[in-house]
Image (cartoon, grey):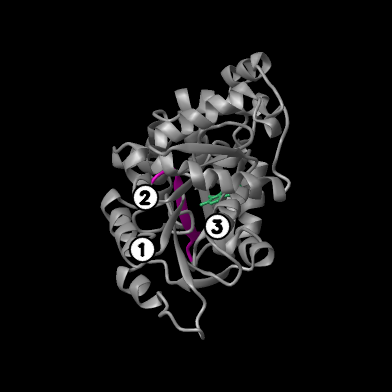
Amino acid sequence: MTSIDLRSDTVTAPTPEMREAMNRAEVGDDVYGEDPTINRLQEMAAARLGKEAGLFVPSGTMGNLAAILAHCQRGDEVIVGNKAHTFLYEAGGISALGGVHSCQLPNQPDGTLRLDDINAAIRPDDPHDPISRLVALENTHNRCGGVALTVEYTRQVGELAHEQGLLLHLDGARLFNAAVTLGVPASELAAPADSVTFCLSKGLCAPVGSVICGSRDFIRRVHRIRKMLGGGMRQAGVLAAAGIVALETMVDRLADDHRRARMLAAGLAALPGLVLDPGTPRTNMIFLSLSAEVPLDGETFAERLQSRGVRVGVTDVRRFRLVTHYWIDDDAVTRTVSAFHETLISA
Ligand SMILES: *Cc1c(COP(=O)(O)O)cnc(C)c1O
């Protein structure tokens, strides 16, 4: 039985069309700026997000790190959500490697930071204080259920930040999921931000890579930092070729992942023993918990699901995350609901 892997959309293997494009890719030494496929991907990504320039990086983590280091000097402060990927899951890189201080504000259930909280967190010009330099948002917001931040909200944060002399960075690892669910171009969600990163390697299905986008001057500075971090790759056009296919053919179909997430949620919600988070799924992620009467912990439950061919993410003692993606078809949704059902009735 082939395994249905719902742990993340990062598990997506490249599509046959991507393998084909990777095979054909023209390459050169990208550290010399001579890889035509990478150059093309960077131009496409920047155009798509309405920015002047883009830079290909090996991961979203390096994208956020390099962008934040390009904006901030040592001791500067970034205002960030307490459930942000950058704060929780990037190994503290901005402080360990950049000496960047963070001010963590409570993420609201809808993934936002309250405008009043941001305003209150901006420091006065006082030698006791670090310099407030940057606000960072995340769209879609992973830990807040994959919820999308709206154009209007992002614009308000951008205005607030810019009025006070701060910059705005957008961790758009799943920015295209947000754009598709809101029915707006990604460029509108990116417009208020001075820098944006997005992942090619998640729902867009490419094997490796993210792109940082921003002004030409900003990207020039990021380029040096990428080199410093060891992220200058050589004939990585083989990777960028898959990224081009991702941007050209995999964005609109994210709507299918969102539809299947709703199908899957509806199937699971009908099973006694499972409690879905209110409002889930927002995009391609479902968050749910085992109710008190189920006599298993999350790890054991997940192992039993796996023996039935279904893998899910365990995010807490009795809590799971399921993420739909290109390799999850309608049949996989049906089989997943059956696997949960069988696991529950035999518990
Ligand atoms: C996955 C993710 C990242 C980091 O991407 P990697 O390529 O895994 O390093 C950053 N931000 C968010 C919101 C993510 O979900």
Callout 3 amino acid: Ile
Location of residue 13 (image quadrant): top right
Q: Nearer the viewer, residue 309 or 128?
A: 128
Give the residue number, with chain letter if any, for mark 2. Answer: 148
- Residue 114 vertical position relative to residue 67 in the rendered view, above or below: below
Q: Residue 161 has which mark?
A: 1
- Residue 66 vertical position relative to residue 47 in the rendered view, above or below: below
Q: Secondary structure at mark 2?
A: loop
Residue 55 among those drawn in magenta: no
- Residue 293 vertical position relative to residue 220 in the rendered view, above or below: below
The N terminus: image quadrant: top right
Left or right for 278, reference 131: left
Q: Are marks 1 and 3 in contact (CB under 8 Å)?
A: no
Looking at the rendering, the stretch of residues picked out in magenta corresponds to 283-291
Callout 1 amino acid: Ala
Q: Earlier in the sequence, mark 2 or mark 1?
A: 2
Q: Secondary structure at mark 1?
A: helix
Q: Secondary structure at mark 3?
A: helix
Q: Residue 122 has which mark?
A: none
Q: Residues within 10 Å of mark 2 (few under 14, many from 20)?
A: many
